[in-house]
Amino acid sequence: MQLYDHAVGALRAIYDRRIDTPATLDPLHYFPNAGRFTAAYPDIRREALAIAGRIDEVPRFHEVMPQQEDISANDGRDWRMFIMKAYGVAVPENLERAPTVANLLAAAPEVVSAVFSFLAPGKHIPPHRGPFRAILRFHLMLTMPRDAQGRPACELIIDGVPHRLEEGESLLWDDTFRHEAWNRSDDVRIALLLDIWRRDMPYDVALMSRALMAAAKAAIRMKGMSYGG
C-alpha cells in the first residue's frame, strides 16, 4: 500500500506541474456528450434501480480494488460499484443489464470507465484524491434521498465546495482535487459515474497518459477483476 501511495503521489506531482484547470469544469468543452447522458436520465435510472434490486450481488469498491480499502471499508457501510467499463475494458455481461448506458458508451469513445455507484445509508467517503489527472469524473445523479427539510441528503465536497445534486443533475469535475462524500439519509444514493479522457493535454503528457492507460488495460485483461452483477 505504501508503494502504491508513493507512486500515486509522484504521478499527481507530474500532472500538477503541467495542467492548471479548476476543480469543476465546463462539460460543453470537456465532455460534449454529457447532454446525451443527462437526457437519458430516466432510462438510466430505471436500469440502475433494477440492479439495485439485487444489490448484494454488486461488489463493494474495495473488493474490486483492494487499494481503495481505506475509503471504501472505513466505516463498515457499503460503497458498491456495478462496473460496466473499466479503463477502456468493457464488461459485456454488465452492459447487457444496462442497454441504455451501453448504447451511449458505444457513441462516446472518450468515456474510459462507467459504473453505477451505490452509497449505503450513513456512508461517509473520507477526504481523498484520485491518482490520474488525465481523466475527469462525470457524475449523474440517479436517486437522491431527502433530509427532514426536504433537501438533498447527500453531499459531495470538492476542494472545499459542497455540491448537492438533484436527481437528473450532473457535474463534471477533476477527482485529483481533495473530495469527500456523505449520505446523511436512511436510503441508498445511486449515481452514474463516468471517467472521461481529458482533452487539450500537453502533447508529452498525453503520450504518457496513453501509456499509463494501456498498462492499466493490460493489467485488467491479464489479472481480471471481480465485477459482480
Image (cartoon, helix red, strand yellow):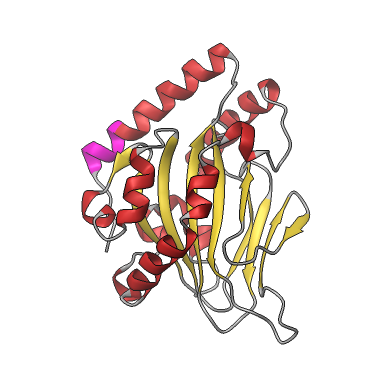
Residue 220, magenta (yes or no): yes
Q: Quadrant of residue 62?
A: bottom left
At 52% from the left and 19% from the top, the residue drawn is: 206
Residue 52: image x %, image y %?
37, 73
Residue 203, percent from left and from top? 55, 12
Whether residue 106 is situated above or below residue 81 in the rendered picture: above
Q: Residue at x 56, y 29 (%)?
A: 11
Which is nearer the eye, 5 or 180? 180
**Rendered residue at 27%/56% (across/down):** 94
Classify the position of the C terminus by image quarter: bottom left
Relative to 86, is 45 above or below? Answer: below
What secondary structure do most residues of the magenta stretch adopt? helix
Tell me: residue 144, above or below residue 102: below
Note whether residue 116 is visible. Answer: yes
Establish if 167 lies above or below 86. Answer: below
Number of numbered labels in the structure image: 0
Residue furthest to the top:
203
Q: Position of residue 165 (x, y in %)?
A: 65, 63
Q: Which residues are magenta?
A: 218-223
Picture quadrant of residue 126: bottom right
In the image as oriented, which residue stretches furthest toward the right? 160
Query: Is 120 displayed left or right of 9 in the figure?
Result: left
Tell me if residue 1 can be seen: no
Front-lying residue, 59 or 30: 30
Q: Position of residue 46 (x, y in %)?
A: 39, 68
Quarter assignment of residue 105: top left
